[in-house]
Amino acid sequence: MGAKAMARGIGLFLLVLATTLTLGPGLGQTKDLVLRVLLKEVPLGQEVRLLLPTGEVRVRGTGEGVWAEGRVQPAWDLPGPYFALDGRSYRGGVRLFSQGGKLWVVNLVLLEDYLLGVLPAEMPEGFPLEALKAQAVVARTFAVNRLNPKAPYDLCATELCQVYLGLAAETARHKEAVAATWGQVLSYSGQAISALYHADSGGMTAGSEEVFQKPLPYLRPRPDPYARGPKSEWRLVLAPEAAAKALKALGRTPKGQEPPEVLERSPSGRVWRLRVMGVEVQGPEAQRLVRLMGLPSALVEFKGWQAEGRGAGHGVGLSQWGAKGMVEAGFGYREVLGHYFPGTFLSDLLLGKAQGAWAGWP
């Protein structure tokens, strides 16, 4: 990521909706992206209570649509600007609809305000500001990359996407990091990248194909010498019962009692081919098996049933503890991003340039 390219980027154009919502003191500008974040799905007939500025609203899904305020409609949009669900408050509004035998509760929230509820969940407030800024750019890029007008929502609020904790989790430092990088995303060939991240690389990041099968030019194995976190080195005793359960979760049947043995490693040094309890697995499935066995990372060696490893998480993309270490060594957030995502540009997300991504849905 060259300095000139990072200074302004290539002015990324994305086919996304630029719209306006009236919000409180968040970071949403008069033009910003609206994300659809799935907060909850419940069986039809089960009541959901929402607390709006105008009072409580009770809704439930039916076979004909969504019941609320004595009426049934195919979908309800409740505008906000704030609301609470299950004791947690959120910015923006709510979209409710029934589909597939469930009532779906989706938060309609501006991108920049969404990030205010993501960063506190994904990176500690005490990390250096430049590391928080790098995380803000990566989280923003991750969200933009997931925009999908054909799907009922863009993102979920759990670790399956990015953890989103809403309004109550916001802090001044996280807000500062989001504001300082407003609208900035990582791009490659004019598109927002698949911006992945994890806790600690253990000293070496992984290539995308090691975990997610698809090789991407900007997600390559990279030395990560500044990654020093609580799980940079660890030792665990693995129970045979845990290994058997993990194999069964993959649809495999244990054939013996042998402890794990690494038969082949990936370019980053992670488990690539593994035999355990008489069953051999390889590729991304081997790394999944390691995680199912409860180990923090696939960068591991086995001595019988004792596991000795480094790092935490899948190892692809930004290493959060590595970013912290780089900043403490004097690097800025642009240099951090350039290290973990080689060949990418730091681009300005230009809003209001195209049709809405979710206009007219459902």
Image (spheres, rainbow, N blue to C red):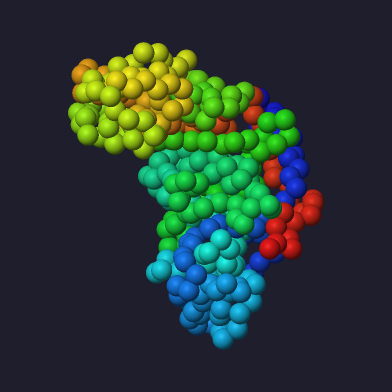
In-front residue for pair 279/235: 279
Viewer-closest of 311 and 349: 311
Q: Residue furthest bottom?
A: 70
Left or right: residue 305 compared with residue 46? left
Say how many tags the image has: 0
The quarter holding residue 31 reads bottom right
- Which residue is at the front of the view, 150 or 203? 150
For residue 49, side relative to residue 353 (left or right): left
Residue 148 visible in the shown view: yes
x, y percent for residue 293: 30, 33
Q: Nearer the viewer, residue 348 or 104?
A: 104
- x and y percentages locating residue 80 in the rendered image: 58, 72
Residue 55 is situated, as x and y percent measured from the top left of the image, at: 50, 82
Asked if 76 appears above or below 183 in the picture, the reply is: below
Residue 29 is situated, as x and y percent measured from the top left of the image, at 66, 59
Q: Is residue 352 above or below residue 220?
A: below
- Which corner quadrant holds the N terminus? top right
308 vs 226, left or right, is left
Give the residue displayed 73% in from the left and 40% down from the top: 12
**Residue located at (53% from left, 72% from top):** 61
Outermost top residue: 263
